[in-house]
Amino acid sequence: ATIAILAGDGIGPEIMAEAEAALGEIAAVGGHRFDLVRRPIGGAAIDALGCPLPSETLTTCRQADAVLLGAVGGPRWDKVDSKIRPEQGLLGLRSGLGLFANLRPVTPHPALFGASPLKPEKLEGVDLVVVRELTGGLYFGRKLELPDQAEDVCTYTVAEIERVVRRAGDLARARRGKLTLVDKANVLATSRLWRRVAEDLVRREYADLDYEVVLVDAMAMHLLSRPTDFDVIVTENLFGDILTDEAAMLAGSMGLLPSASLGEGSRGLFEPIHGSAPDIAGQQLANPMAMLLSVAMMLRLSLGLDDEAGLLEQAVWDCVSEGQVTRDLGGSLSTGEAGAAVRSRLS
Amino acid sequence: ATIAILAGDGIGPEIMAEAEAALGEIAAVGGHRFDLVRRPIGGAAIDALGCPLPSETLTTCRQADAVLLGAVGGPRWDKVDSKIRPEQGLLGLRSGLGLFANLRPVTPHPALFGASPLKPEKLEGVDLVVVRELTGGLYFGRKLELPDQAEDVCTYTVAEIERVVRRAGDLARARRGKLTLVDKANVLATSRLWRRVAEDLVRREYADLDYEVVLVDAMAMHLLSRPTDFDVIVTENLFGDILTDEAAMLAGSMGLLPSASLGEGSRGLFEPIHGSAPDIAGQQLANPMAMLLSVAMMLRLSLGLDDEAGLLEQAVWDCVSEGQVTRDLGGSLSTGEAGAAVRSRLS
Ligand SMILES: CC(C)[C@H](C(=O)O)[C@@H](O)C(=O)O
Ligand SMILES: CC(C)[C@H](C(=O)O)[C@@H](O)C(=O)O
């Protein structure tokens, strides 16, 4: 299998090194072959080539079976007014590869209940996935920027809604059978379309699921007051951006949350949800676990290597349980040592 | 002073009865005169007059010194596809009265730390106000609803941003001097305008404030991981809708959170942030405290009765501390008994 490797900025290269090493170990143990093709993206690509998503990077990703991404962005490129920003590399990749469904699982690990701002009794049994629409809505609508006024347009079509709700429905069916749509249908026209299309689709194709609808403002509360009630949550792009970060707080640490972005086929982009953390970059302080869990999602969802994915996940959770972790999780290991601790459990 | 009384739907009439009784007591004790003018809104107005905001209601509010609102909405009027919905009454009132700034204070009371999903050590010392822009953005932009596609437009002008940031800046100056702008400037054109306008205004007129900018997705985390770091948070309409409900969870109960919606003058609309709770309506189970705290905000912000406002707030918090509360807060009082307990402390 060919894997595009986009290390990106900040701590990206350090955590990606651990991902590559883990893939090397998995290849050796299982007799697989992974061809890794490294390409620049984000700030690193701006510095090297003047553009956050060089066309060669996009082409490589299109030809690959899967894409691994570290992180993009940092204060060096952070002028809001500049025409060229690292995030454009990420947004361009999402739309260029047609990755319309972003999956973010949140399963708090008991060893980290102490690190969450929530009470442990709220976290016990939480096991949810947010499926966020990723190539539509306000992110990709027409924009207007005048000196005195600005405008963003949010558009959704029936087809855009159906394909992502279908992804979420399939996922719910393979899990606990519960699907929750989040919208703001009492105010937004696009939300009313989401609600109508999702309800029709569920009635026709997913009648076996336990289906409910929650307003986005109410969901911002329910995620905290009754997080165990949710299984698969599906929502539009911007609501998903906000709610997934809120949900991340349930897990106690951003350092343990992977994500997958999927399109029609099996190719996906896999990345930790934490950012590039420029303040700790280059010091071997970064936690590689979310990156390694993203590798596991890739093995399962794009490469069909379920056993290897399970093995890697188990290795990560064993390290977490036994305190073989970096300082952000209360351990004392460096990035490389934490990665090595995981690898040592793979053979 | 003339006060428009809009009881609305669900538990609205029950909690409004306690507000009226408290005003009666305050008038008697302090020698004030309050003229209460009752008008229908929301579902009640749809049932009575076929319209969620009858013109007589709007006119009464325009002529009043302040408006008290209970709650609007309920399953009876909850068909998303219908052209007439109770929420339109509320949105029409906000824009009809030019109430562009919605203030929601969140100060968790130690007696209720147990009721919050957050750990007590996170809540200790939290004292923040969200200032939400209330008459612009996606809520009031052009909408398109076709069978196959829908569209919402988010627009902001420099003037709309300046007036609400100024409100927030004045408020921060009267508090701890810290102002936080929340936006999504890495993606939205309107957010880039917010950022530019707010930064210019702060540099010119509020250079004494401690000012920072946080992205909305990061804020969804920071509100939980470091809530004591915030004083006044200012943001656009939809972000404010989501973040204020999330912040409400810090307080342990929706039953204790008031809000004020203000325009250019001193006239405001005051309402609890909880909804109409149709499931418990008419049973004397509703908690009147958020409504009474909204009355206190009205006394202070629209009627200039600071002492009376402080007295009413103190009475509410004393009842909470001593467990003279309704069942949702662990007490055993009815709506009317809780209201009476507060009143008995006013003389
Ligand atoms: C970097 C930014 C554009 C991006 C987004 O808003 O989608 C990030 O917050 C995310 O959630 O992946
Ligand atoms: C009822 C609804 C339209 C309203 C809003 O979204 O503004 C409510 O959620 C609020 O926050 O006051």
Image: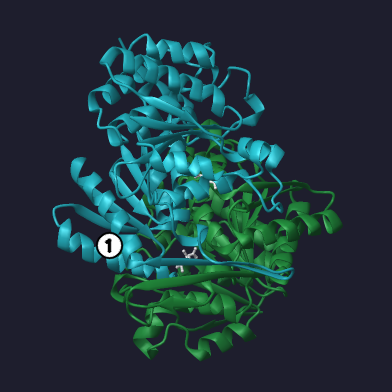
Chain colours: A green, B cyan
Task: Indicate the secondary structure of the residue bearing disc 1.
Answer: helix
Above or below, comparing residue B213 to residue B299 in the picture: below
Above or below, comparing residue A72 to residue A211 in the picture: below
Front-most of A269 and B272?
Answer: B272
| Residue A325 appearing in the image | no
| Residue type, label 1 | Ala
**Residue at horizontal 40 percent and vertical 31 percent from the top:** B3
| Residue B133 appearing in the image | yes
Residue A239 on image: x %, y %: 54, 57
**Residue at horizontal 57 percent and vertical 62 percent from the top:** A259
Above or below, comparing residue A43 to residue B274 in the picture: below
In the image: residue A36, left or right of residue A176: left
**Residue at horizontal 74 percent and vertical 58 percent from the top:** A196
Q: Residue A47 falls in which quadrant of the image?
A: bottom left
Residue A262 on image: x %, y %: 65, 69
Residue receiving disc 1: B198
Front-most of B60 and A71?
Answer: B60
Quick one: quadrant of the C terminus of chain B?
A: top left
